[in-house]
Structure formats: structure tokens, C-alpha cells
Amino acid sequence: MTSKFNPMRRHHEHCRHVRAQMSDYLDGELDPTTTGTVDRHTRFCPNCRRMLANLTRTVAGLGALRSLDERDDDAET
Amino acid sequence: MMRSADDDEQLVARSQSGDRAAFDELAARHSTRLRRVLFRITQDCDAAYDAVQEALLRAWKNIGRFEGRSQFSTWLTRIGINEAYRGLRRPGEETLELTDQVGERIPSWGAQPDEIAESHEFLAAIEHALTELPLDYRSAVVLRDVEGLSTAEAAGVLGIGERALKSRVHRGRLALRSKLDGYFTGGYR
């Protein structure tokens, strides 16, 4: 007899749900409950934790492009 | 030189009274940034330059209709993007295919995030990855994350709803993150 409960599938569904929230999480646009959900999941799920860390660096890098542009603009004027 | 939004308001008011010199000052303040934004979106230096010129012309003709509900720079960017899009394919034709990656091992990018974010190599890798995004996603990411517009402002510039803008930004960021894995795992750091 096989159980209908599949913990790995459930975990992956949770990963999908959390990853879908990551941009709003980074932008500070989640409600406290969902923020807590993302915090708890990424604390225990190494792949989602790395996904969030890498996404954070991607967004930081995009912002750094703007800083670089502004430095170039200042140098031109 | 002061370049505050308050100064822009005064220059806009003078421009709306027909003061061409005031409008030229607005153009001088904002055209460099606009050209940079349009280049990042079109990936074509000539197209970006032409779109800026057209945008400034249209902005001058229509300055009387500018109601000040957004910043002048946001309004001008919207006009510029419309001009730039004219020479490109119609927006919405290209979709972004993303693999789920759930259950796959996500590579670690290592430590020292501040140094990485400031690294010229990393920024060059991001610039390159941006060029590979479909136009709609690239535009959303450039406005939101590179130019630092709010969700509402970026949605307004692109003429789409905030929900659609957020979706494009999120998918664009995920695609960039995935492309940048190669920077860290490809051995050219």
C-alpha cells in the first residue's frame, strides 16, 4: 500500500510558492505573514536560500549599474 | 548645479508659457539619462539617439498637456520608450521561457556580496545578460532595477498595470539570475 502523502512533492510545491514571492520579498512588498513564510522556508531549504541570495546579488548588481552610470555622468559634466 | 524635481517644475511651468530656453534646460538635464535608458532597452546606439531626438520634439510640442501627475523625467521617458518601440517589433510578441528549477541544485555564488556587486566583471556580465532578455522584460528590469523607478512609475512609463509590471520584473530577474550562474560556475572569474 502506498501513501498519498509525498513529503518531497509537498516541499517542492512550497519551494514554488516561496520562489514566486521572492521579488516582492526583496522589494519589501509582502505582508508580514508571507514574509515570515519566506524567512522560515529559506532558513531550512538550501536551494531556495541560494536562489534568494543570488537574486539579491542580481538586483544589487543592477542597482550598481545605475551608480556606475551616475559616476560617468558626473565625470562628463 | 541643482537638479531637483522642484527645479524641474519651475522649468516645466516656464516651458508651458512658451519659454524655449527653459525647455532646452530640461532637455539638457534629462537627455543623457534618457539616451542611456533607451540604449539599454534597444541595444542600438543610433536608434536610442533618434528616439531621444523624437521624444524631445514631441515633448516640446505637447508640454502644454503635461499635467504634472508624474515627474517630468518619467513623462519624457514614457515618450522616449514609445518612440524607441516604434522601430522595434511590437511589444508582447516575445515571451520568456523559464525552467522551474525546483528540485535542482541552485549553485552558490560564494561570499563577499559587496565586492561582487561592485566588480566591473560582474557588472559587465549583468549588462550582457540584460541584452539577452526579451524586450518587454528588459524594459521592465531596466526601469525598475537599473533606473530605480517605483513599481507605479515603471508601470506608468510602459503603459501597463502594476501587476503586469511586477510579473515582468520578477521573471526578468529570475532569468538574469539563471544566466549569471554561468559567470560563477563557468570559470571565468
Image: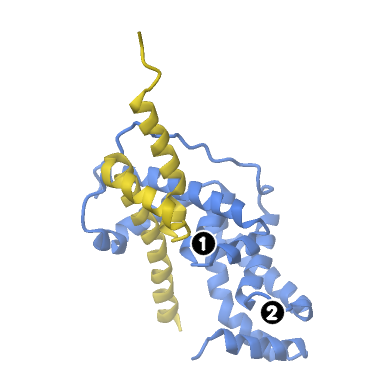
Chain colours: A yellow, B blue
**Separation of residues labelled 1 and 2 (CA atoms):** 21 Å
Answer yes or no: are tags 1 and 2 on the same subunit.
yes
Relative to A20, say whether B60 is above or below. below
| Residue B57 badge | none
* B102 sits to left or right of B81: left
Relative to B6, say whether B116 is above or below. above
Identify the amino acid type marked 2: Gly
Residue B120 placement (x, y as % from top left): 31, 61
Identify the amino acid type marked 1: Arg
Residue A62 placement (x, y as % from top left): 41, 60
Q: Residues within 10 Å of mark 1 (few under 14, many from 20)?
A: many
Relative to B17, say whether B32 is above or below. above
Residue A38 visible in the displayed image: yes
* B82 sits to left or right of B122: right
- Give the tally of numbered discs: 2
Q: In the current view of this chain or complex, which residue is farthest to the top?
A: A1
Q: Earlier in the sequence, mark 1 or mark 2?
A: 2
Task: Give the residue at mark 1.
Answer: B144
Write the residue at 68% across / 67% down: B79
Q: Chain of mark 2?
A: B
Q: In the rendered structure, are the residues bearing label 1 and label 2 in contact, judged by CB atoms less than 8 Å apart?
A: no
Q: Nearer the viewer, residue B80 or A21?
A: A21
Residue B19 placement (x, y as % from top left): 73, 91
Q: Residues within 10 Å of mark 2 (few under 14, many from 20)?
A: few
Task: Give the residue at mark 2.
Answer: B68
Residue B107 visible in the displayed image: no
Write the residue at 71% across / 91% down: B14
Q: Secondary structure at mark 1?
A: helix
Residue B77 placement (x, y as % from top left): 62, 68
* A20 sits to left or right of B79: left
Q: Secondary structure at mark 2?
A: loop
- Hey, which quadrant is residue A3 in on the image? top left
